[in-house]
Amino acid sequence: MKQAILATIVVFSMIAAAFAGAEPAPQPKWMASPVKELVDKARATTRHATIIDLKAALDGDKDVVVLDVREPNEYEVAHIPGAVNVPRGLLEFSIWTVVPNQEQTLYVYCKTGARAALATKQLNELGYKNAIAVDTGGVAWVKAGYPVQTSITDEEVVILPAQR
């Protein structure tokens, strides 16, 4: 029994760390590099949605696909329930199998929104005109108290933000 409780605590700790670190992360180095310009251009040329828009689409039973473009290890720890994982680095090669219908509405998310913007721009260039980048990503999803799913236990959980 003690082992089961300990395992549960470890799993929930991993899920919380995957999306919403305990302390604010320092600004990533790419933010001070030419990559920031690429991300800004991608954001300027693609459709965007908030997590509230995504949640409304999911709750409204709309025919949407939620595409998680993070790395598989990030997805495994915690992801939006029902999301399909296609890492950004494999997007061009894998999307045709995962979502063959180029008219399909796709909500693309990552941890913070930068990879989602780049992936959405690429999807548009590949002919997916209904691809929508989720601006704030998984971090905001968790902070809003929306459920996440973990592949570790294959359960849906809600992570409550730490009280400060």
Image (cartoon, helix red, strand yellow):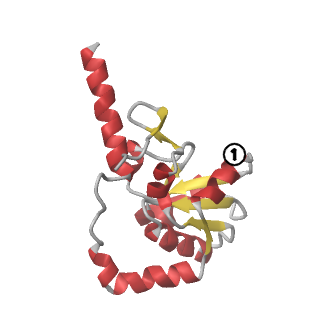
Q: Locate residue 9: give its quadrant.
A: top left
Question: Which residue is the site of mark 1?
Answer: 59
Residue 10 shown left or right of residue 37 in the figure? left
In the picture provided, is 101 more to the left or to the right than 160? right
* Quarter-of-image position of residue 14: top left
Residue farthest toward the front in the current orientation of the protein:
164
One can see residue 122 in this view: yes
| Picture coordinates of residue 117, whole percent (x, y) | 51, 72
Q: Amino acid at mark 1?
A: Asp
Rendered-image quadrant of the N terminus: top left
Q: Nearer the viewer, residue 72 or 56?
A: 56
How far from the left and from the top, in percent, is residue 4?
30, 19
Rendered residue at 59%/82% (across/down): 45
Residue shown at the point (42%, 59%) measured from the top left: 111
Q: Is residue 86 visible?
A: no
| Residue 53 horizontal/vertical position (percent) | 65, 59
**Image spot of residue 16 (x, y percent):** 36, 44
Q: Nearer the viewer, residue 40 or 147?
A: 147
Secondary structure type for disc 1: helix
